[in-house]
Amino acid sequence: MLVGILGALVVVLGIFLIRARQNRQLDRGLLLARKQTECRLLEENKYYKELFELGDS
């Protein structure tokens, strides 16, 4: 009976660790996507600013 309880605890701990790792990977992916989006928006803003300045001249 003790072996069964310990086995169940090991399985639960393994599931917990796997989920924690997946969440960290998801967080990294979201941070990378956010950074890429910010960079793209900065480039677009720069492009439109240059177009606006050319239109004024």
Image (cartoon, rainbow, N blue to C red):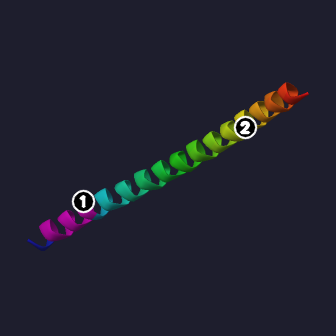
Is 27 a magenta residue?
no
Which residue, as the protein is rendered here, is positioned at the far bottom?
Answer: 2
Judge from the rendering whether residue 47 lies leftward or rightward of residue 57; answer left or right: left
Q: What are the residue bounds of the magenta stretch? A: 3-12
Judge from the rendering whether residue 42 lies leftward or rightward of residue 50; answer left or right: left
- Please state, as top left, top right, bottom left or bottom right, where the C terminus lies in the image: top right
Q: Position of residue 14 (x, y in %)?
A: 31, 59
Q: Position of residue 46 (x, y in %)?
A: 78, 36
Task: Count how many numbered circles sit on residues in the image.
Answer: 2
Judge from the rendering whether residue 43 lies leftward or rightward of residue 26; answer left or right: right
Which residue, as the protein is rendered here, is positioned at the far right?
Answer: 57
* Foreground disc of the pair 2, 1: 2
Between 12 and 57, the one lying in front of the other is: 57
Between 18 and 32, the one lying in front of the other is: 32
Q: Position of residue 28 (x, y in %)?
A: 54, 50
Q: Which disc, if any, is residue 45?
A: 2
Q: Above or below — where is 3 with respect to 46? A: below
Q: Position of residue 26 (x, y in %)?
A: 46, 49
Residue occupying image coordinates x 30% and y 64%: 13
First along the sequence among labels 2 and 1:
1
Quarter occupied by residue 8: bottom left
Q: Above or below — where is 29 with respect to 52? A: below
Query: Where is mark 1, residue-wise?
Result: 11
Residue occupying image coordinates x 86% and y 29%: 56
Q: Which disc, if any, is residue 37?
A: none
